[in-house]
Amino acid sequence: MLKSLTDEQLVERALLDEPEAFGEIVKRWERKIFALCFGMLSREDEAGDAAQETFISAYRNLANFRGEAKVSSWLHRIAVNQCLTKQRRTKTRSETFLDDEGNAEERMFIAPLHQSPARRAEQSERLSHVRQAVNSLPAELRQVIVMKEFEEMTFQEISETLQLPLSTVKSRVYTALKQLRMKLERIPLEVV
């Protein structure tokens, strides 16, 4: 029955002391929130912590949800704030994007079995360059590009989430894409 309710209706039910309603919100949004946190923090453990802290904060502040924005935008805003706080606390610099790379390629982008090892190595190298380029962006550009390109959020959703004018969001996405293009053009990629 809870699955048929909107996010906003679930918040209302959670406020009426139905914890299962908030559990349904978590089920619906945990993957997206984790992906956003991972895109901003670059480390799986930190992203997991930030996502968890996002839902804890949301639950504690349910009474403050005024319904002026969608629940998804509210959760994304909390997640962005959690990530920014975590970055400030740990003084994470953008160059640390690949510190904990490990087997991230296998977890996130699994190559088809029919690809040659050389092709997989080339794709892995390209992915590494893209990660470095994204991570080298200033935080305000990185967060919009992660939301737009990796989370596939609309400009309007990003605007609501970050509480920024739509024109600012579009400008930041354009600037981020331009900087990424310049960074990636400087990297010679060999064709294997």
Image (cartoon, rainbow, N blue to C red):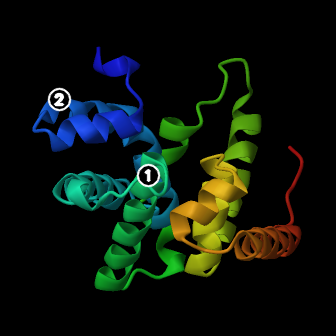
Judged left or right of residue 1, residue 94 is right
Crowding around mark 2 (Cα neighbors within 10 Å: few <14, some 14 to 19, many 20+) is few
Residue found at the very far left of the displayed protein: 17
| Marks 1, 2: nearer the viewer | 2
**At which x and y percent is residue 172?**
73, 75
- For disc 1, the marked residue is 102
* Left or right: 180, with 100 as reference point: right
Measuring 39% from the left and 69% from the top, which residue is drawn there?
A: 83
Nearer to me, 80 or 66: 66
Give the percent coordinates (x, y) of residue 124: 66, 47
Q: Is residue 137 above or below residue 131?
A: below
In the rendered image, the vertical position of residue 110 relative to residue 127, given as above or below: above
Residue kind at label 1, given as amino acid type: Gly
Task: Please tell me which residue is depicted at 65% across the width and 29% down the height of the picture.
Answer: 111
Query: Can residue 74 be seen in this snapshot?
Result: yes
Q: Between residues 36 and 71, which one lies in front from this camera angle?
A: 71
Q: Position of residue 21 (x, y in %)?
A: 23, 31
> What's the mark number on residue 20?
2
Number of residues whose C-alpha sits closer than 10 Å to that of mark 1, classed few (under 14), some (14–19) or many (20 or more): few
Secondary structure found at label 2: helix
Q: Residue at x 88, y 69 (%)?
A: 185
**What is the C-alpha distance between the residues marked 1 and 2?**
36 Å
Between 97 and 55, which is closer to the camera in this rendering? 55
Q: Quadrant of residue 12 in the image?
A: top left
**Mark 2 belongs to which amino acid?**
Glu
